[in-house]
């Protein structure tokens, strides 16, 4: 599975890569530091991911702004996008679901809990029938 991970925090990126490597499966992580970088990556049809893991709080273009652009694109709007954030703000949650996300996961503080959540998210999407853009 190709996973586009949109996150500006290097520690969060290391945590995700570490967790994915422990799964011992052949997933490819494509990294973008913000929404603008992610949109550039998505222009390359060879880099279209199976799923997107998206942080909300980023510089230049936040996650909600990225989602609004993504969901207006006739080709890319079907990409399953899972929010992976520290934001417990109910308004963010509701806005993201209104725009059309596939899930909203709050990053826990403990690494073991983070690892457990990521493994469950990946396992869920591994068994889904995915529509490629």
Image (spheres, rainbow, N blue to C red):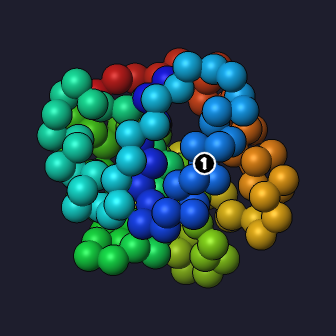
Q: In this view, does 11 lie to the left or right of 74?
A: right
Residue located 82% across and 64% down the image: 110
Q: Give percent across and percent down for residue 31.
A: 38, 47
Give the image quarter of residue 4: top left
Give the image quarter of residue 111: bottom right
Q: Is residue 63 or residue 6 the one in the foreground?
A: 6
Q: In this view, does 122 lie to the left or right of 10?
A: right
Residue located 66% across and 57% down the image: 105
Q: Give percent across and percent down for residue 83.
A: 54, 57
Instruction: Locate the C terminus by quadrant.
Output: top left
Up-down: is 16 above or below 67? above
- Label 1 residue SS: helix
Judging by the rendered image, the residue that carries numbered circle 1 is: 16
Count of numbered tags:
1
Q: Give percent across and percent down for residue 112.
A: 84, 53
Up-down: is 27 above or below 95? above
Badge 1 crowding class, 10 Å Cα cut-off, few under 14, some 14 to 19, many 20 or more, is some
Q: Is residue 78 or residue 11 the one in the foreground?
A: 11
Q: Give percent across and percent down for residue 106.
A: 68, 64
Residue located 60% across and 30% down the image: 125
Residue located 75% across and 38% down the image: 120
Is residue 64 visible to us here?
A: no
Is residue 82 visible to us here?
A: yes
């Amino acid at each position: 599975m190709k996973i586009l991970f949109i996150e500006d925090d290097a520690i969060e990126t290391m945590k995700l890569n570490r967790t994915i490597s422990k799964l011992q499966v052949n997933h490819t992580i494509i990294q973008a530091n913000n929404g603008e970088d992610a949109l550039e990556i998505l222009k390359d049809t060879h880099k279209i991911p199976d799923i997107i893991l998206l942080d909300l709080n980023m510089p230049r273009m936040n996650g909600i702004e990225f989602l609004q652009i993504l969901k207006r694109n006739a080709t890319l709007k079907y990409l399953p996008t899972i929010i992976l954030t520290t934001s417990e703000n109910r308004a963010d949650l509701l806005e993201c679901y209104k725009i059309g996300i596939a899930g909203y996961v709050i990053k826990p503080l403990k690494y073991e809990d983070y690892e457990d959540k990521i493994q469950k998210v990946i396992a869920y999407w591994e068994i889904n029938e995915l529509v490629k853009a």
